Image: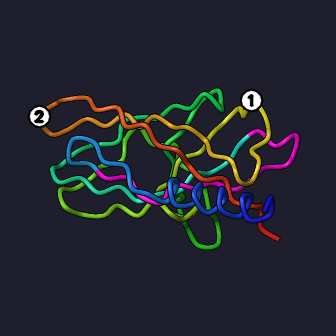
Amino acid sequence: MTHFLYRFTGLLTALLLGAAVYAQDIQVEGAWTRATAAGRDSASVFMFITSKQEATLIGASSPASRAVELRTMSHKGSMMKTLVLEKIVLPANKRVDMTSIHGYHLTLTGLNAPLKAGAAVPLTLDIETADKKNIKIEVRAEIKPPKK
């Protein structure tokens, strides 16, 4: 019975974390990150964002880290460079893919503690709409096991 309850709780958690978050015509889906080892002070967070109107992701924060940076990668020849962005444009009715380390993503910097698989990281996304309204969207990013 305990094994069943453990599996049921895990399934319920996965379903709740996998659910999309909606706020003011903005949808955030599939937010996740990887568990981190002790001593590691950063982690990338991935997700999809769709806005029914033109909007801009202008920042993010999390109680799990000192800061959250908006990032992408620059590729020149065989060299890759991390770029910290001031904003990420969210075109109207276009699903913005933030699921690759080589494209747009968020990075938690100055982690307060290692991220443990099976838990979730709370995030607040700060989005500005075309009509200059600020929207705060609360998201929980699933923490997946580290890559093997």
Snapshot quadrant of residue 127:
top left
Instruction: Identify the residue at image location x=68%, y=47%.
Output: 119
Instruction: Identify the residue at image location x=78%, y=49%.
Output: 36
Mark 2 neighbour density, 10 Å: few (under 14) some (14–19) many (20 or more): few
Instruction: Identify the residue at image location x=37%, y=49%.
Output: 21
Q: Which mark is residue 75?
A: none
Residue under label 2: 131
Instruction: Identify the residue at image location x=35%, y=42%.
Output: 57
Q: Nearer the viewer, residue 86 or 130?
A: 130
Q: Residue 75, image x and y in percent?
A: 54, 66
Residue under label 1: 112
Assign the N terminus to one quadrant of the image. bottom right
Q: Residue 41, image x and y in percent?
A: 76, 39
Most extreme residue toward the left is 131
Left or right: 53, with 64 as reference point:
left
Helix, strand or loop at mark 1: loop
Assign the C terminus to one quadrant of the image. bottom right
Three-letter amino acid code at the position of disc 2: Asp
- In magenta, the rendered stretch is 27-41
